[in-house]
Amino acid sequence: MNTATKVTDLNTSELLQNIRQKTLSATEATKAYLDRIDSLNTQLNAYLYLNHELALENAASIDKRLAAGDDPGPLAGLPIAAKDIFVTKDLPTSCASKILADYQACYDATAIDRLRRAGAVILGKTNMDEFAMGSSNENSGYGAGRNPWDLERVPGGSSGGSAAAVAARLCSVALGTDTGGSIRQPASLCGVVGMKPTYGRVSRYGVIAFASSLDQVGPLAKDVEGCAAVMEAIAGHDPRDATSLPHEPGAYLQACNSGIKGKRIGIPKEYFVDGLQSDVREAVDSAIDTLKSLGAEPIEISLPHTRYAVATYYLICTAEASSNLARYEGVRYGKRDLEATDLTQMYRQTRQLGFGPEVKRRIMLGTFALSAGYYDAYYAKAQRVRTLIRRDFDDAFKQCDLIVTPTSPTPAFPLGEKTADPLQMYLADIFTISCNLAGLPGISLGCGFTADELPIGLQILAKPLAEEDLFAAAAAYQHATDWHLRCPEMAR
Amino acid sequence: MNIEDFPYEIVIGLEVHVQLASQSKLFCGCSTRFGSPANSQICPVCSGQPGVLPVLNRTAVAYAVRMALATNCEIRKRSRFARKNYFYPDLPKGYQVSQFDEPIAEHGSVEVYLDDTPRKIALTRIHMEEDAGKNIHLGGSQFSLVDLNRAGIPLIEIVSEPDIRSPAEAAEYMRSIRAIVRATGISDGNMEEGSLRCDANISLRQKGCETLGSRTEIKNVNSFRFVEKALEYEARRQADLLDRGERIVQETRLFDADRGVTSSMRSKEDADDYRYFPDPDLPPVLVDDEMLEAARQAVPELPIARRRRFVEQLGLSHYDAKELTKERELADYFESVLKAGAKAKPTANWMLSELLSQVDDARNLPDAIVKPQALAELLSMIEAGKISGKIAKTIWPKMWESGHSAKAIAEEENLFQQSDEKALMKEIDSILQKNDDKVQEYRGGKEKLFGFFVGQVMRATQGKANPQLVNQLLKARLDQS
């Protein structure tokens, strides 16, 4: 390869090609990323767990197989970061919670296992909001991650560490999870591509559950093709996850060349309202113009129940979380308060000390929403509204093929700005939440920058299982623009 | 006072938990074998590790459907699992996966024989759920230990309407349930191993009153006898309170089998709010026509129906029919003996006395060394007068020891009945000669000496003489003169 180009500046396809053609070894690639991690992670706090020796060993074994003429898989030698929500048998998994401090899992999540089988090299585990609850990474039990575009700003959340790691070139691609925008929102705030597949497309086995009916695994990368390559490796039915879909995954990389000609793109009027920052609006409007110039046909649509999405989401996700997090009580693993003198005290103290404030808030909200006498008014009603929101999308997709919106109403906000007001924080996900409630695939990619060099994200949503359409549209836009080529100052 | 003489009517409803006989747990591949070392049958899923997900065991569903059919339930083609949330160290996930508002089956019935007339007890529902683990409290230790081998084992809970009217009927109802689960093969019904246990709800009301009284629930009773004893104690306790004009506190009680009493565990006021909601990790349980048909094929004739047939078609007594249908294997054995040519009544008699004294557990009969054909042969030898019943009883244990046929043993040991008239006459004459004085007494009117002469002949022939023939010949000789 051209030695003038830095290994870490290569996009995913180039990197894979170089390794496959042996112009670059997996070991060199891994080492290049580890070096950058060593120099930048202290500032970014993007990684929680790293094991250089292990990563280099894995890379060396890929090189050995390549040298022997084996095919180690389509992602051979790809240095990848995994959100600390994926359990891994060779690295600790904390879910950024003190209650699971240095917890060592005894198995690999399905997505991790599939990445390993595809030849990827796992560099480490990235920072996140504790149990994926948050939109800024400030709820991490191990210190907030930082945004590489401005270290005084949040990287977004909850997959903030993954997004920051991709943006700062601390990995080629990263794995995240998206419950209400947790891949797309940080991707938007960090100026990378983040994709959330259809609910059930990627196995949730081994993903520490936050809200089971909303959680979905997806990739983050510098470009659309990087996400497509990871998706090809991780998507598909898993017999260990009863909610995983039986459908065969699509040819996502190929779809990246399909273009957007003739596609009707719906612009939901409910998304272009007060609270949407003007420079974000302008960037998205201009992106819609670009899509039009590429042959797409924009039409205005309505998603009338949009205004109920945040309330609906926070009832459902907290209810499920209150139950999902019951297992962290100190009996079998993780933190246990040793001062406790009886069982009830052990439960109380362990959870009191182990969980952070936002996690406790959500457990309490969810416990309340499921309580006898309140269930119908809250949880059951939220489920009915969820059906209405899903129907909004069904109706909209009768008129259009794709839906285009801003990903986040604002670019990355300063650290500490919203921590005192949980409701303000919840509104950061206002454009991303409906997609999870409806189980749709969605993607966020860069569509501009603010005057002070902060990335702006464009969100595209597609029909269930229509990930190919999503990749086609996103790639068409990316091929016509160069936002994705910009690199934060600190990472140059 | 006998509880039958109370001025109150006893109203009982039972929740029976049955462990399904599937090889693996409800949501993972771990074995369900009983009695293994603690925590040797666990995996990330059933021990509630972070990130795990449940996958439903289809065999368990098939068993639940089979039970639902055998109890005349309506089967829900689309049922759901819910989470029952509470904290306890033996509950790894902090919730139990169970069925709540959409159980797999509803509105069934179970027939119960108390005396000789059957009564139908209505079922509210049958639902599937997973078992919890087991806490082990070591004496003197500051800690308790948890064994999760049982966690995730598939159960069904069979909930009856408050249709049961006495503790004895409650025990009989449980026996019926056990007979059905064993006949259908969905459970081993083994109560010592906890495969069948129940919670019993009981209330009293003035005879003739329509509304139900306040009830108490007795938790986790695991034998027929204890169910009856616990309910009887509880009926008396409630009757005493009502007699004194006091009110029954709705509460959960525990039965202490050693002392034969129930005691309060917790009142309704402290009852947990389980915060049930549909389990988002599990899609709805679908039962299609194919599954229903397979379950239908797998439901054999039920013990109660078999019992009725034994009475009505084979002429057995209610008692014999009931005893023979207690275990499926026993009834199967019985019918195999009949098929091999034996008659019903002598077979039933033989089996309930002689056969059951040879086997510890009738459920092992399929592997017994003495096959039904061998018993049929023995019975036919008695029937044909080739051996006496008494000799047969000496041959029988030898068949169990050696596995040889009755015929072979009789031949080898020369046990065939002596029916040769000439030879017998010779014996008779020699005995009468030796006991001339008694012969005179007999002829003088002391007729009960006849038995003495018979005994002498039998002794002289080592019991082999055909008793009818001896009677006949002896009578003829003595009455001659």
Image (cartoon, coloured by chain):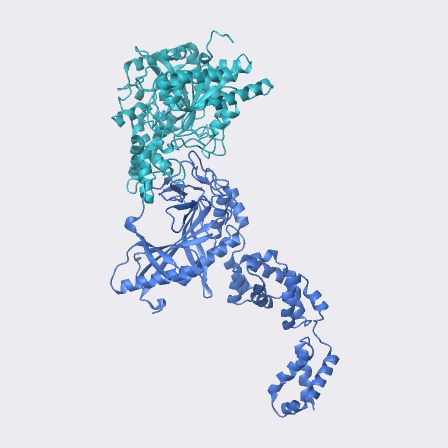
Q: Is residue A262 visible?
A: no
Q: Colour of chain B?
A: blue
Res B100 quadrant in image:
top left
**Quadrant position of the N terminus of chain B in the picture:** bottom left
Residue B184 screen position, x and y as percent: 52, 52
How many circles with numbers are drawn on the protein?
A: 0
Q: Position of residue A247 (x, y in %)?
A: 49, 28
The x and y percentages for residue B479 are 67, 88
The outermost residue toward the front is: B140
Residue A26 visible to the viewer: yes
Residue B400, above or below B147: below
A306 vs A192: above or below: below
Quadrant position of the C terminus of chain B in the picture: bottom right
Q: Is residue B161 left or right of residue B65?
A: left
Residue extending furthest right?
A: B422
In the rendering, at what x and y percent does residue B28 appear?
Answer: 48, 40
Q: Colour of chain A?
A: cyan
